[in-house]
Amino acid sequence: MSNQQEQEYGYFDDVAKEYVITTPKTPYPWINYLGDTAFFSLISNTAGGYSFYKDAKFRRLTRYRYNNVPVDTGGRYFYIVDGDTVWSPAWKPLKTELDHYECRHGMGYSRISGMKDGVTSSVLFFVPQGEDLEVQHMTLTNSSLTTKKLKLFSFAEWCLWNAEDDMTNFQRNFSTGQVEVEGSVIYHKTEYRERRNHFAFYSVNESIQGFDTCRDSFLGDYNGFDSPEVVAKGQPNNSIAHGWSPIGSHYIEVELAPGESRDFIFTLGYVEMPQEQKWQAPGVINKTKALAAIERFDSVAKVEKSFKQLTDYWDDLLSKFVVISDDERLNRGVNIWNQYQNMVTFNMSRSASYFESGIGRGMGFRDSNQDLIGFVHLVPERARERIIDIASTQFEDGSAYHQYQPLTKRGNAAVGGNFNDDPMWLVQSVTVYIKETGDFSILEEQVPYDNDESKATSLFEHLTRSFNFITHNLGEHGLPLIGRADWNDCLNLNCFSMEPNESFQTTENKEGGRAESVMIAGQFVLFGNDYIELCRQLGKTAEAERAEGHVEQMVQAIKAHAWDGEWFLRAYDAFGKKVGTHEADESKIFIESQGFCTMAGIGKDDGKLQQSLDSVNKYLACDYGIVLNYPAFTEYKIEYGEISTYPQGYKENGGIFCHNNPWIMIGETVAGNGDRAFEYYTKIAPAYQDDKVKLHKTEPYVYAQMIAGKEAATPGQAKNSWLTGTAAWNYVAITQYILGIKPHYNGLQIAPCIPRDWTEYSVKRVFRDVTYDITIKNPEQHSSSIGWITVDGERIAGNVLPMFEAGSLHKVIVMLG
Ligand code: BGC
Ligand code: NOJ
């Protein structure tokens, strides 16, 4: 399964579940994420990036400079002085040419190795499970024939906790910085003397011969990270920072005999102390907790044990859904990288990546609900907790804060609400969660509104209010009012902004707000049907019937007012004019309403569904994926808002906004077109883009939010990698709708919709602790019709697999026919 053939920048090593980067000069920094619950780090292939605790805005541990020159400035850096040669094992920041370089990004870890003049430094970076620290395990090896006397400098620059304030409030911040140094540990304690109960540390498990904690002293005046003065003179200053910019740098002298190796374990950690235990003496921090954490990683054996725990954890997670087909790209995407990206988007929402600065956006209400659908099979307990957190920020009328902060779990008032698609995403995530787990008890949880416990109701009631929010907010065509925007944040139909300093998302909307969304209409039908099905499962027949009435009405409204002749309209604007119509000069057709209406099966009975999909294929599909709208807006049209601010072909204006491509894939499976569904899948799935890596620029192992569309000046160029609903939705499209293994309340449902020329594939699926070993056979070149299914040799009726005792294993054969 390994594709070891060398590409220009690297290759997939599927056995190790790694992407191996073979040059530091990738077209853009290619990053990875460390940590999965509280302590997180971003790390690029040249060791750039930063760490934070829970919240990338309020608890930023180390500094990083976004949009800096050179690109990717700031990270965990090492400098090695070997005689007259000075080099960095991850190439940056010194950029001395290396004799060998390799970066292996794996599941929750990265290993970066550099070699120069017979010395190899290999550093394994990871965040041990359950710990609030990053381990940097360096192995230095001398493979030359002479003894090497090396000088090693480490480097990390502290961020003064609030990442936004840290970048702006210099009149205060240049006076507050404080550190302590004791033994081999450098402590960062800015503001600890006042309201903070937390500090950070950077340690190494060897005795050091010096240190620096003052950036200016370490670098020297006017120098960059690529030419620190202490490295040049080969001697630290033992500086203590008082304000300005505190850093942590260890200095170690290492003598290595030919063939000798030495290990150094650096840990960069975060500690919170109870108020009454903060100090060990006046002004001296109580270090017991920090030292205990450091001790847990002070030997290679301890690090290896903890690293094995991490790799075992991932092996286990990735054993829950395994496809085995003769398409190694499919296997690679589904079994490794897509699921990994799902975990990362679940953890980060849209907060911290190399495109998301970690200060603007916390957890998105719609984003986190959607991230969950690709993650729930991995760690259902965490999905459960997330659902409660999200629902707790909902308002009593069913609407919601658009975002909340992960640290406080409270709604973000600066952004507010009124994105009228938000409520229904909660219905999707909760029903998906219950189908995966069978845990109906979540519906009885008492969940507050706007974090006010006194207003708590059952979670089920939250869903009812989500549903009712739509029926209470319909416009003149019986379609849902759009509010500030629906899924497309940039279609701001009620906004009318002429003020460049205001955000399209938060600025005051025009009184009245008449604009209606066909996307939300389709979404209401799709997830409304999920709500109805849930009510039926619960025996709430009257509620199911009430809801059915509303959904049916919505279908009628769509058919009567949202069909343009060849495709579904996108919206009605604030003047009651059609949006996304052949009558318009630009943006005649949009993807979102085609996606949601076809996923919901609207128009399957009268040909509209197929026609809508055919129009997508004709007008929106291109070589790099499916664009969002066509033709793109060529000028600012105030009545449409932000969408028309983007140059043609980028972002929401004619870009391939990958998030919505799987909606069309799923729509194609509803229509029974397996060939087309899969073709769309391969257009954007990272594993299939080996010939486009250079063009894309972003990481070849994960989805990007956007690929420039066919009308762009640079078609095919990707941006905004990692944090995007693309990950979860593509995973659902390929695993549930194309490969056709779909969790249901009463068992696993089998409903493949595949290219006709696939003759056979297998899926191992662990569902509610039962392992199903499923082989789908297709000797007669069908796409979706099922001839028969056997479970352990017995024919079953229907296509839902029976449930069994936990821990058991069952063999399933599915014959298409
Ligand atoms: C982007 C959207 C994003 C929105 C809110 C817009 O500029 O194009 O993709 O969701 O900002 O941050
Ligand atoms: C990015 C946002 O995170 C997401 O919520 C939104 O749906 C898309 N942009 C489209 O505008």
Image (cartoon, helix red, strand yellow):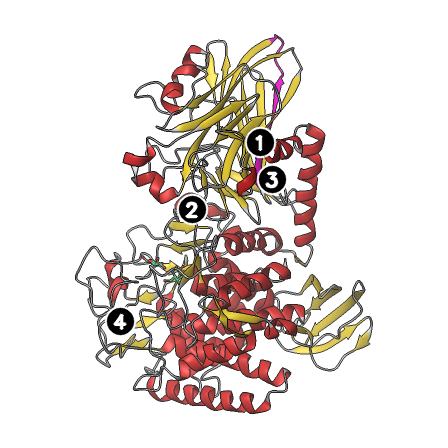
Please give the name of the residue rendered at 47% of the width and 65% of the height, measured from the top-left corner: 451
Q: Label 2's element?
A: loop
Q: Which residue in the structure is indicated by mark 3?
A: 4
Kindly indicate whether the residue at mark 2 contacts the one at mark 1 (C-beta within 8 angstroms).
no
| Rendering coords of residue 62 (x, y %) | 45, 36
Please give the name of the residue rendered at 48% of the width and 84% of the height, measured from the top-left corner: 604
Mark 3–mark 2 Cα distance, whole angstroms, equals 41 Å
Question: Which callout, 1 or 2, points at the residue further toward the start of the chain?
Answer: 2
Q: Nearer the viewer, mark 3 or mark 1?
A: 1
| Rendering coords of residue 784 (x, y %) | 61, 75
Q: Nearer the viewer, mark 1 or mark 4?
A: 1
Kindly indicate whether the residue at mark 4 contacts the one at mark 2 (C-beta within 8 angstroms).
no
- Helix, strand or loop for the magenta stretch, by majority: strand
Question: Which amino acid type is marked by label 1?
Answer: Lys
Q: Which residue in the structure is indicated by mark 1?
A: 287
Question: Which callout, 1 or 4, points at the residue further toward the start of the chain?
Answer: 1
Q: Label 3's element?
A: loop
Mark 1–mark 2 Cα distance, whole angstroms, equals 23 Å
Q: Is the residue indicated by label 2 positioned so its CB lies within 8 Å of ligand 1?
A: no
Please give the name of the residue rendered at 41% of the width and 77% of the height, measured from the top-left corner: 397
Mark 2–mark 4 Cα distance, whole angstroms, equals 33 Å
Q: Which residue in the structure is indicated by mark 2?
A: 58
Question: Which callout, 2 or 4, points at the residue further toward the start of the chain?
Answer: 2
Q: Label 1's element?
A: loop
User: Which corner quadrant holds the C terminus?
Assistant: bottom right
Is the residue 712 above or below the residue 306 in the image? below
Question: Which amino acid type is marked by label 4?
Answer: Leu
Please rate how many residues cluster around mark 3, counting C-alpha atoms within 10 Å: few if below 14, some from 14 to 19, many from 20.
Answer: few
Front residue (pair 410, 248) = 410
Question: Which callout, 3 or 2, points at the residue further toward the start of the chain?
Answer: 3
